[in-house]
Image (spheres, rainbow, N blue to C red):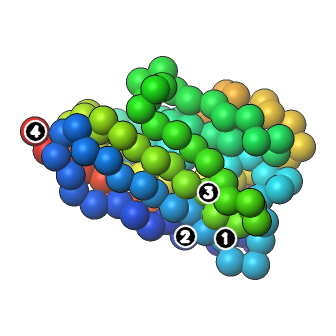
């Protein structure tokens, strides 16, 4: 079982930046699609970004050009760099993983494809 631990959330003003991290002690992400999802109160969980087994990246339209997903060279930590944050980015952000060699789950950014989840970290963007 893969245990995912997010960190890096917080409160920022609009236009600011945050970097989220997702670690899985004892595991590497080389055979996983890793994703970031978010959920605001009263809203469905939505896919934000994902990085596949080959390092290919995928983004929701709402964050393209502002957010960057990456993983470290040892492939045991995944990051989400969030720039130009907007109040509508306020949500609980979750790291997720699915064991796969294929890029499909990453490209779809569908929460139902992912079997491992962290507990989430809160991001609040104020005006």
> Which residue does the numbered mark 4 point to in the structure image?
127
The label nearer to you, 2 versus 4, is 4
Which numbered marker is on residue 78?
Answer: 3
Q: Are marks 2 and 3 in contact (CB under 8 Å)?
A: no
Relative to residue 108, is residue 39 depicted above or below?
below
How far apart are the alpha carbons under marks 2 and 3?
10 Å
**42 relative to 7 in the view: left or right:** left
How far apart are the alpha carbons under marks 4 and 3?
28 Å
Q: Are marks 1 and 2 in contact (CB under 8 Å)?
A: yes
Residue 66, position as x, y percentages in the image: 41, 32
Nearest to N terminus: mark 1 or mark 2? 2
Nearest to N terminus: mark 2 or mark 3? 2
> Which residue does the numbered mark 2 point to in the structure image?
5
How far apart are the alpha carbons under marks 1 and 4?
34 Å
> Which residue does the numbered mark 1 point to in the structure image?
24
User: Which residue occupies 79% across, 52% down?
Assistant: 32
**108 relative to 11 in the view: left or right:** right
The label nearer to you, 2 versus 3, is 3
The image quadrant that residue 118 belongs to is bottom right
How far apart are the alpha carbons under marks 2 and 4?
29 Å
- Please state which of residues 103 and 54 is positioned toward the viewer in this rendering: 54
Nearest to N terminus: mark 1 or mark 3? 1
């Amino acid at each position: 079982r893969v245990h995912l631990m997010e960190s890096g959330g917080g409160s920022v003003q609009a236009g600011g930046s945050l970097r989220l991290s997702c670690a899985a002690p004892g595991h590497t992400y080389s055979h996983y699609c890793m994703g970031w999802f978010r959920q605001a109160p009263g809203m469905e969980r939505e896919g934000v970004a994902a990085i596949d087994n080959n390092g290919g990246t995928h983004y929701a339209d709402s964050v393209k050009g502002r957010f960057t997903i990456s993983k470290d060279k040892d492939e045991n930590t995944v990051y989400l760099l969030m720039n130009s944050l907007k109040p509508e980015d306020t949500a609980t952000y979750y790291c997720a993983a699915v064991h796969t060699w294929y890029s499909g789950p990453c490209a779809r950014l569908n929460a139902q494809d992912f079997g491992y989840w962290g507990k989430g970290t809160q991001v609040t963007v104020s005006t």
